[in-house]
Image (cartoon, grey):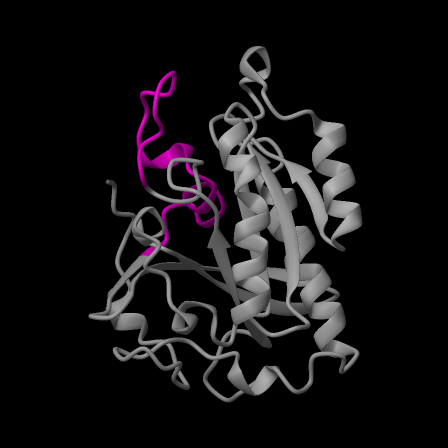
Amino acid sequence: MAEGSNYDYLFKVVLIGDSGVGKSFSKYTQPYQSCCPTAVLSRFTRNEFNLESKSTIGVEFATRSINVDGKTVKAQIWDTAGQERYRAITSAYYRGAVGALLVYDIAKQATYANVTRWLKELRDHADSNIVIMLVGNKSDLKHLRAVPTDEAKAFSAENGLSFIETSALDASNVESAFQTILTDIYRIVSSKSLESSTSNIEPPKASISVGPTVDNNAQQGGKCC
């Protein structure tokens, strides 16, 4: 652990998927009427929210630390800040990421159909060893389900992804999703399989590039919509 730091590992994890699937701090569409606390990212980080505005890419990121095998793992979780609706995500968003949550809405078939495109983009721009989890969000909408669980599981198995269904509304499996992917990343990194990537696992500066430290004074509280 570096002197003055409060963590042993810092991992950048990106959230990708269609707009409106419930990745971050944006509102759900009907039948959801609630705001920020229903999003996957805000559920996990408990509204410990930092906002970074960049001229070339809009990025929101939040942080939270967990314990894995006696080590403190700090997750820095990046969200697209709505840029995905304009297809404006650039390679800078993926740079240095060692994990990705690919999120779709179980009640909207179109968001699942687009998973293939998102997966291709991720593999085109991210490190080849990145750990990817497919997340079917809004599992509380069982009566509106449009994507069978078995179908998504089969797709994940065929593409080497882990899989989970979550509900940010009632918090089911959100904690488990992040715990699982961060544990998987830690065990790969600690076994040296991602040794070549760890030099890029650093927090962002004001520029697009990733810098050496997090400015804790710049962190803000949870910010809603």
Q: Which residue lies at the image location 25% right of the left edge and 41% below the top edge?
A: 224
Q: If the image is split into quadrants, where does the N terminus sit? A: bottom right
User: Which portion, as a residue range, is magenta?
Assistant: 26-49
The one of 216 and 59 positioned closer to us in this rendering: 59
Q: Looking at the image, which residue is at 34% across and 25% down?
A: 29
Q: Quadrant of residue 220?
A: bottom left
Q: Is residue 11 above or below residue 121?
A: below
Residue 45 shown in magenta: yes
Q: Is residue 154 above or below residue 90?
A: above
Q: Quadrant of the C terminus?
A: top left
Q: Position of residue 88 (x, y in %)?
A: 32, 59
Residue 216 point in image, percent of width and height: 32, 71
Horizontal arrangement in the rendering, residue 146 relative to residue 54 (left or right): right
| Quarter of image, res 72 | bottom right
Is 36 colored magenta in this rendering?
Answer: yes
Q: In terms of depth relative to the viewer, which is nearer, 132 or 191? A: 132
Provide residue 208's location: percent of width, then percent of height: 32, 77
